[in-house]
């Protein structure tokens, strides 16, 4: 999707320049390909037809004697079925267990949400803990979901299950040197030195080279794969990669790390805070890395990355339960 077009649509939404709420016809690509910011809510749909909205009260907007909570709304695509509500306690230091309202409590919350006039809702759980939740603009979210249902069809393709290939860290590994062209946009004093290396399966090695100075907030490293048989060094080349290209592939990734015990490569573009931005997860396979999942959080409200709105999921990849 053209970035300028998407930015214009979001700007018009926020500025109130589009038609009235009930008359808006937002093309499904704007809902399916990126998370929309709807009056403080994040809303998005993935390629499997799952639509989620998450919102929370902004910090310091109300005096609270309980816990500020995010409200996750999972829309049900079945005709006449209400969405499922889950409360995510917001704690910047640790991820607390979700709170699931009973059917009766969920019905009461939905009634208040559909009223759409209250700024803040409160919910008391079984141990009398009070959670404060956003209360406005839920009718807009339901209207957007109805538009999505009417214009977008989920297409599933049968694929063989894919298990990510695990990696083994290599110590004191002497990696091939990078060229001046490959290092042209790097700024670290020791740019081009190998920061880490792994054997991945039987086909290739994964190499991470220094690019940004240590401690930089948006750290950039250069990621390459090395074919074990032919010895060819190839940039990682995933969609999020930036920088100089070789064979049409770039190597630079922001805030990226490799989980060798899971065979997963994770990269995140931050929006200036650890609790928001864009997250992409890739799985190592014998032929390289394939996209597993994308998530996005536009509002920096204290969510951990596993609670960000998912915009893509590869159903063929078998992910670990604890991911």
Image (spheres, grey):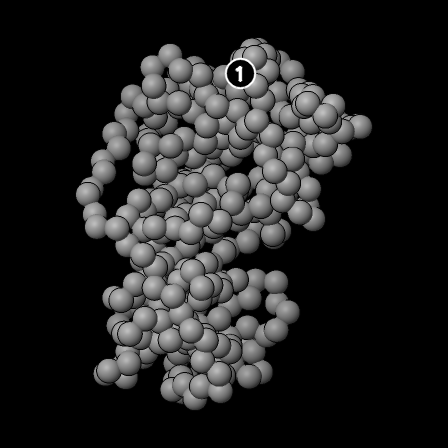
Above or below residue 181? Residue 25 is: above
Q: Secondary structure at mark 1?
A: helix
Q: Residue at horizontal 75%, vertical 34%?
A: 60
Q: Residue at horizontal 45%, vertical 31%?
A: 52
Foreground of the two, 238 or 9: 238
Above or below residue 105? Residue 317 is: below
Q: Quadrant of residue 143?
A: top left
Above or below residue 299? Residue 80 is: above
Visible residue check, residue 30: no
Foreground of the two, 87 or 5: 87
Q: In the rendered view, does 187 fall on the left or right side of 260?
A: right
> Residue 217: image x %, image y %?
61, 63
> Residue 267: image x %, image y %?
47, 59
> Residue 178: image x %, image y %?
40, 84
* Quadrant of the drawing holding the N terminus: top left
Residue holding disc 1 = 103
> Residue 38: image x %, image y %?
51, 29
């Amino acid at each position: 999707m053209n970035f300028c077009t998407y930015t214009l649509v979001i700007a018009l939404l926020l500025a109130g320049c589009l038609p009235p709420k009930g008359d808006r016809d937002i093309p499904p690509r704007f809902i399916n390909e990126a998370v929309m910011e709807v009056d403080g809510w994040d809303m998005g749909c993935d390629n499997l037809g799952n639509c989620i909205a998450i919102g929370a009260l902004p910090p310091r907007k109300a005096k609270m004697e309980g816990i500020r909570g995010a409200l996750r709304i999972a829309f049900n695509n079945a005709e006449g079925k209400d969405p499922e509500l889950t409360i995510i306690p917001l704690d910047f230091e640790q991820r607390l267990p979700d709170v699931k309202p009973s059917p009766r409590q969920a019905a009461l919350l939905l009634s208040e949400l559909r009223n759409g006039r209250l700024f803040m809702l409160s919910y008391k759980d079984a141990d009398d803990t009070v959670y404060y939740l956003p209360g406005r603009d839920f009718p807009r979210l339901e209207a957007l979901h109805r538009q999505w249902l009417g214009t977008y069809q989920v297409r599933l393709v049968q694929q063989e299950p894919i298990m990510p290939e695990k990696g083994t860290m290599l110590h004191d590994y002497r990696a091939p040197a990078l060229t001046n062209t490959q290092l042209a946009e790097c700024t670290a004093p020791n740019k081009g030195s190998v920061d880490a290396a792994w054997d991945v399966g039987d086909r290739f090695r994964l190499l991470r080279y220094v690019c940004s100075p240590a401690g930089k907030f948006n750290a950039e490293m250069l990621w390459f794969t090395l074919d074990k048989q032919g010895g060819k060094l190839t940039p990682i080349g995933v969609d999020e990669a930036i920088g100089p290209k070789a064979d049409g592939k770039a190597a630079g990734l922001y805030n990226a790390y490799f989980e060798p015990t899971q065979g997963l490569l994770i990269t995140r573009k931050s929006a200036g805070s650890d609790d928001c931005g864009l997250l992409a997860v890739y799985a190592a396979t014998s032929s390289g890395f394939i996209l597993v999942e994308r998530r996005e959080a536009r509002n920096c409200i204290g969510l951990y990355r596993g609670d960000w709105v998912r915009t893509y999921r590869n159903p063929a990849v078998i992910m670990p339960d604890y991911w």
